[in-house]
Each structure stands twice: as structure tokens, then as C-alpha cells.
Image (cartoon, grey):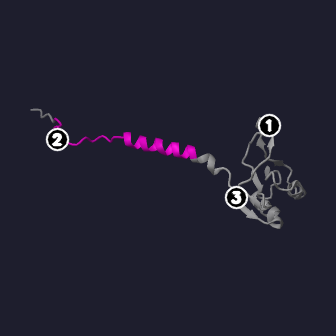
Amino acid sequence: MAFRFYRSKKEPMSEINVTPFVDVMLVLLIIFMVTAPLLTVGVQVDLPESAADSLPDDQEPLTISINSKGEIYIQEHQVTYQKMVPKLLAIAKNRTDTRIYVRGDKNINYGRVLEIMGTLSGAGFSKVALISEPYKN
């Protein structure tokens, strides 16, 4: 004699409903897509405009920023002029072929930016470049 078990209408479903989970994940994805570009620039610098093409990036470069007050930042951390080269060498693990981008505020003295670039070149860093905003017509 064979017994057949039928699920009654009052028993709960054993499957998980993933629709609310997918909805939450899509909202989080949109939030991260909107906030990610805001996290890229740590120091507020008003860059000059240039018509030059951008350089291809093969690895993450180090960024030195000089704001309108003349303060120097490595990535988002403020450093003094005297401690700039030792900190860069420590971050780059004494590799002087590390790419370094210099972001200078357009209101700062051009000589100050050149002085910092000269110091970096004198320390042995060979890949030092200036960053500018794309030229707007």
C-alpha cells in the first residue's frame, strides 16, 4: 500500500524569495556608482586647463598635490617640503621608476611647482608628470 503525501495549503513554502535581496543589491550598486567618483580626489586643487592628451596608466601612480596655500600632500596626507622625498621613497619602496603626478593649483606660483618637480628629479624619480584639467572650448 503506497502512501502519498500532499502538501496542504496551510504549510509554509520552503523556497527563499530572493526578489527583495536583488532589489537591495541594485540600490547599493547605484549608491556606490554615484559616490565612487567623489572619492577619487582627496585634496581640493583648482587645476589649469590643457589641450594635451592624457597618458596611459599601467599602474597606480603616486599623486602630489599643492593647494592654493602652498601646502604639499602625498595622496591625501599633508607633508612638509623636507619630508616629501623620504616619504615618497618609503611609499615607493625605493623604486625611483614609480610614476608621480604633480597636481598644482592654478593660483599658486609656477616656480613653487617647478621647485617640487626639481626636487623629485634630483631624488632620482624619472617619471614625474604634471596633471591638468582638459581644455574646455
Amino acid beneath label 3: Glu
Q: Quadrant of the C terminus?
A: top right
Magenta highlight range: 6-34
Q: Quadrant of the N terminus?
A: top left
Q: Nearer the viewer, residue 137 or 18?
A: 137
Q: Nearer the viewer, residue 127 or 41?
A: 41
Q: Residues within 10 Å of mark 3 (few under 14, many from 20)?
A: some
Q: CA distance from mark 2 to mark 1?
A: 68 Å
The residue that appears at 76% across and 55% down in the rendered structure is 65
Amino acid beneath label 2: Lys
* Label at residue 10: 2
Which residue corresponds to mark 3?
76
Point out the tag, 3 or 2, that comes first from the N-terminus. Answer: 2
The single residue placed furthest to the left in the displayed view is: 1
Residue 58: x %, y % from top left: 74, 42
Amino acid beneath label 1: Asp
Residue 51: x %, y % from top left: 81, 37
The quadrant in which residue 134 appears is: top right
Q: Residues within 10 Å of mark 2 (few under 14, many from 20)?
A: few
Pointers 3 and 1 in contact (CB under 8 A)? no
Pointers 3 and 2 in contact (CB under 8 A)? no
Which residue corresponds to mark 1?
53
Q: Nearer the viewer, mark 3 or mark 2?
A: 3
